[in-house]
Image: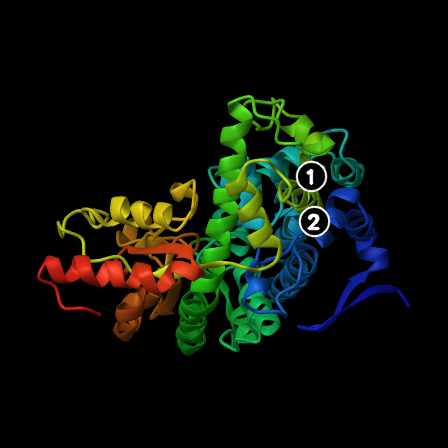
Amino acid sequence: MSDKVFRDPLYNYIAFDRQRDGWLIDLVNCREVQRLRRIHQLGVSNFTYPGADHTRFAHSLGVTHLMQLVLEHLERASDAEKIKNARQALLATALLHDTGHGPFSHLFEPCLDINHEQWSIAVIRDESSQVHQVLKRQNAYLPSHVADLINSDDTTHPAWQRALMSSQLDVDRLDYLRRDSLFTGAGYGHFDWHRLLTTVEFFDGETDLVWPAKSALAIEEYIFARYYMYQNVYLHKTTRGFEQLLQATWKRANKLRQDATNISPNPVLEQFWKTDKPEPGTLAVADYLRVEEFTVLDQIQRWTGHADKSLADCARRFLERDGLAMVEPPPALNPLKTDDFGEWEPELHKLLRSKGYEEPAMYCLADRVKGKYRQPYREEKDTENQSAVNTIRVLVDGTPIAIGQYLPRLNAVIAPPEDRMYYYVPKEIRNDAIALSQRLRKSAGKPTA
């Protein structure tokens, strides 16, 4: 068999040709890529959806598979030589784009004060990393080309290359929407992904990408899939509660550490915390990559016996899935200031103290989700500045038209929703917090929910 085959629940088989892409198999076997087996794709969504235990590694293989498919299509439909010249860099980018992720993926970035994109670039550029060595051995230019494509601010390479990997409709999104839907069991990620991959075409001197008008309904399906996944999975209130709990636990530990209190750090995190600003250039790539989910879970386990009661309790709650409950605050006093709830937080803190919670700020957690983060699709309104990177467009009589303009009915979905503000409190005081919210609502002359 000339192919290296991976059995995948989403695509059945993912295959890499050993003769043509043997270097890609070497890349899969690099320790920096294998580390992704130990990072959950959806953070702590498995606390809500028990099946959501899939990893960044499986996702990265899936993205690489889709990149193969779309490049094969473009190679058949256009300038084959141009595609061949960019093929290695694009496949490597698909496989390596998430190598900089920390524990629990996006969830833990504010805890560690990191940006995973910066670390992905650092891993690829670090001459001591195995991925750098494999890339450079294949082609001396590859590490720089791949790092450029991952860098969202870089415009060195043609827009179509960036668009395939990172845009409003790219192979990354096509994989994670369907994969996350499958493993959560939510069932919302259904759209004609194969049509989207095999109808995309070059435009504007073969520097940009568009879709034919016949693919408009497949694009509409895709946008609705994003909408439903955000509403039902990515921003699920139970998941958000555990995210808030984990971040509050880490924030408390950091405060104690900065106050010179011993927080019993494990060796990996002790080394990590020696750097005031853990970013590429001040922290070694190898030291960063050692921070994994089992490192964090070990640390949280240590904190369950800490002398600080709040830290110990929140650590226990996280490990035992004894989470927090969502409570809606009373209406904002000033419509122009959506987080002005008057006496709500002070009264909630008073309630928590009366129930024996020594650190109310750890148990009264505000969760603000900006509307733009709940928006399933955003497009550039200025026609002259539109490209495949910022707008999904269909070709009508030779002119590219934004999908929101071509299908006006989508505007109700793609319009940015209002910011959302919820609070999370211990489940055992949830009813008291609801009663407090209703009392404040009534005193403000607002109808109760």
Quadrant of the image occupied by residue 221: bottom left
Left or right: where 424 falls relative to 91: left
Lower sequence index among marks 1 and 2:
2
Q: Going by the picture, which residue comes out furthest to the left? A: 445
Q: Nearer the viewer, residue 105 or 138?
A: 105
Q: Quadrant of the N terminus?
A: bottom right
Mark sitting on residue 88: 2
Q: CA distance from mark 1 to mark 2?
A: 8 Å
Left or right: where 298 falls relative to 343: right
Q: Residue 252 appears at what percent x and percent y?
A: 50, 36
Q: Quadrant of the C terminus?
A: bottom left
Residue 346 visible in image: yes
* Callout 1 amino acid: Leu
Q: Residue placed at 65% from the left, 55% from the top?
A: 56
Q: Residue placed at 44% from the left, 67% from the top?
A: 226
* Callout 2 amino acid: Gln
Quadrant of the image occupied by residue 329: bottom left
Q: Residue 315 appears at what percent x and percent y?
A: 58, 47
Q: Are marks 1 and 2 in contact (CB under 8 Å)?
A: yes
